[in-house]
Amino acid sequence: MSEQRLPRCTDCGIFSCRDRDKEYPGFCTTTHETDPAELEELNHLYGGDSLDGRMARTAAQIEGRYYCQKTRVEETVMFIQQMGFQKVGIASCLGLVDEARTFAKILKHNGIQYVSVVCKVGGQDKKEMGIAEEDKICRGGPETMCNPILQARILNREHTDFNVLIGLCVGHDALFIRHSQAPVTVLVAKDRVLGNNPCAALYSGYYKRLYEK
């Protein structure tokens, strides 16, 4: 595939795929990377009774009815309820366990069963994964590693219907999602510098330092 034809929606300023009232640009992903047969297949998927179809429609309904009215916490609870999920898993960073406790209380108040597991589960030292002393946060002693695969496996064994991530580190969240058998949503994306608001780096001049070598 040529450089020009790589799927890059971020290079577009037209977004005919949304408005459907303009010509599509020459590099458009909709016109070059999607097949009419595939779109028809997806229409059947989204309109069907599979888990994928029900999730897609539920998400769209909540978006349409409560756009800019409900917080992400509220939308998450509504999504769980409307999907009829019976058991929800909470995979939390230990550093955000207070936030996880609050979310658990909200689930309980709404009659939703939950199970939870923090990132340090297993209590293994970072030396078990080959981390050098200079790569530890606190050097000179034992330091417990994060264990996102074990978090996922424990929730898999609990047969959760839906898992919620609260503050797992970049990469650890990806590992959890990779190993989770249930669908996953991110309630909190950790950013220790910006108060767990990663977009702040995109909204201000702060992002300029990311362009520096």
Image: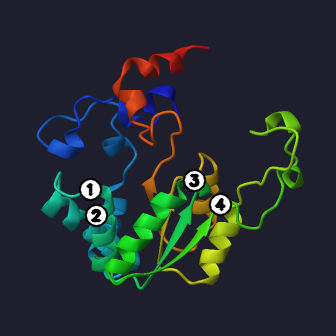
Left or right for 150, reference 7: right
Q: Which residue is mark 3?
A: 168
Q: Amino acid at mark 2?
A: Glu
- Amino acid type for the residue under numbered disc 1: Thr
Question: Between residues 132 and 173, which one lies in front from this camera angle?
Answer: 132
Residue 88 appears at what percent x and percent y? Answer: 46, 77
Quarter of the image with the C terminus in it: top right
Precedes in sequence: disc 1 or disc 3? 1
Marks 4 and 2 sit apart, C-alpha to C-alpha, by 24 Å
In percent of width and height, residue 137 lies at: 74, 39
Q: Earlier in the sequence, mark 1 or mark 4?
A: 1
Residue type (three-letter) at the residue carrying disc 3: Leu
Residue 165 in sight in this render: yes
Residue matched to label 1: 71
Front residue of 185 and 97: 97
Instruction: Please state the total of marks drawn on the protein image.
Output: 4
Looking at the image, which residue is at 31% across and 57% down? Answer: 72
Q: Which residue is mark 4?
A: 119
Instruction: Say if residue 40 shows up in the picture.
Output: no
Q: Quadrant of residue 80?
A: bottom left
Label 1 and label 3: CA atoms lie apart by 20 Å
The label on residue 75 is: 2
Which label sits on residue 196?
A: none
